[in-house]
Image (tube, helix red, strand yellow):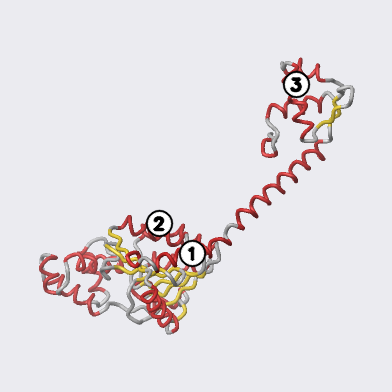
């Protein structure tokens, strides 16, 4: 048992408990029982009296306060102090809006900071976490393809924090994204916590917007983890917001789990070409050249198809694709 949370040290608690058990004893008896000298006892008496745990008479007689009253009073006093401190901390949020306006004005006077390029997964994820942390109104995004499972875990803390803070969280996902079980499960998790999720058949590109003031778009639409642009230029961001709202207005609610499988398409024309070329060529380099895409993009197509099929390797993917009539 401890009263340190209400400002009473463990040593002084020992002194208080001595007097509770020995109400007839004076300060001299306490010193002898605890092995304290008179100065230490006097210091402890003063401390206990300051917390109203004891009272000292003119004759230095110790009068012990009822712990059910005295300690409860200390708890109420401490709770009041904590509430006051919490209110003061929360009140500082009122400063955010003014500081954000100052920041925007500064950014408008510094064109070089309106567009920033980030290279590499770590730099992109770090900036995503920063933008989510400092968002205080709204988050919007378009999701044309599945999230990697590792990225879902990295994003979960930021997304859940935004939802807990009451920020409006919206995303529109393409059928390809919803076909991935991990991505779909995560979107349903966020929707259950207050996020708004819709689906669209419209061709979309990956992007995210925070507070209608900052947008993030990949440099290479086929590999959004390679490099991305963080855009603060008001005109560009406004057009990005308008595009999102147009997609949002024409999208549909996320279907129930039982309905989704029946409504999902099989393969896109590009994915059918990938499977066709894969069955006719021995090397990825040759297949990528035939399709007119980069080797990295071709291999990403293969990885996406394998994920949709639940295949452990390419050979199994070919067999499963044939079973489903995809090739």
Which of pointers 2 and 3 indicates the residue nearer the eye? Answer: 3
Residue identifier under label 3: 41
Across and down, in percent, residue 49 comes to 79, 31
Across and down, in percent, residue 138 comes to 49, 70
Residue identifier under label 1: 100
Q: Could you say which is closer to the camera, residue 261 or residue 255?
A: 255
| CB contact under 8 Å: marks 1 and 2 | no
Lower sequence index among marks 2 and 3: 3
| Quarter of the rendering occupied by the C terminus | bottom left
Residue under the point 72% across and 17% down: 36
Which of pointers 1 and 3 indicates the residue nearer the eye? Answer: 1
Q: Is residue 61 left or right of residue 84?
A: right
Work out which residue is located at the far front of the displayed protein and give it. 109
Q: Is residue 209 left or right of residue 290?
A: right
Lower sequence index among marks 1 and 3: 3
Q: Could you say which is closer to the camera, residue 315 or residue 165?
A: 165
| CB contact under 8 Å: marks 1 and 3 | no
Residue identifier under label 2: 154
Give the alpha-carbon distance from disc 1 to disc 2, as whole Å: 26 Å
Lower sequence index among marks 1 and 2: 1
Q: Is residue 230 left or right of residue 83?
A: left
SS class, disc 3: helix
In the figure, residue 56 lies in which quadrant? top right
């Amino acid at each position: 048992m401890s009263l340190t949370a209400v400002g009473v040290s463990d040593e002084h608690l020992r002194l208080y408990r001595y007097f509770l058990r020995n109400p007839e004893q004076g300060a001299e008896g306490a010193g002898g029982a605890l092995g304290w000298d008179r100065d230490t006892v006097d210091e402890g008496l003063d401390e206990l009296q300051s917390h109203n745990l004891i009272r000292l008479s003119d004759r230095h007689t110790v009068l012990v306060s009822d712990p059910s009253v005295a300690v409860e009073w200390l708890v109420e006093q401490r709770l009041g102090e904590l509430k006051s401190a919490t209110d003061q901390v929360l009140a500082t949020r009122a400063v955010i809006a003014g500081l954000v306006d100052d920041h925007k004005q500064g950014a408008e006077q510094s064109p070089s900071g309106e567009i920033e390029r980030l290279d590499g997964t770590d730099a992109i994820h770090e900036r995503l976490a920063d933008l989510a942390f400092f968002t205080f109104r709204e988050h919007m995004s378009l999701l044309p393809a599945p999230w990697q499972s590792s990225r879902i875990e990295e994003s979960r803390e930021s997304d859940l924090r935004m939802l807990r803070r009451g920020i409006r969280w919206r995303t529109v996902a393409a059928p390809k994204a919803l076909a991935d079980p991990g991505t779909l499960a995560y979107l349903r998790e966020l929707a259950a916590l207050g996020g708004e999720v819709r689906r669209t058949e419209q061709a979309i590109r990956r992007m995210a917007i925070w507070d209608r003031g900052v947008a993030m778009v990949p440099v290479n639409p086929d590999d959004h983890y390679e490099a991305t642009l963080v855009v603060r230029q008001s005109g560009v961001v406004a057009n990005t917001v308008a595009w999102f709202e147009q997609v949002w207005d024409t999208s549909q609610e996320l279907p129930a789990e039982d309905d989704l499988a029946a409504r999902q398409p099989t393969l896109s024309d590009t994915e059918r070409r990938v499977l066709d070329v894969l069955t006719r060529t021995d090397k990825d380099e040759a297949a990528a050249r035939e399709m007119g895409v980069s080797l990295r993009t071709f291999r990403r197509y293969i990885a996406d198809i394998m994920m949709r099929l639940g295949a452990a390797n390419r050979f199994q993917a070919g067999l499963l694709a044939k079973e489903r009539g995809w090739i």
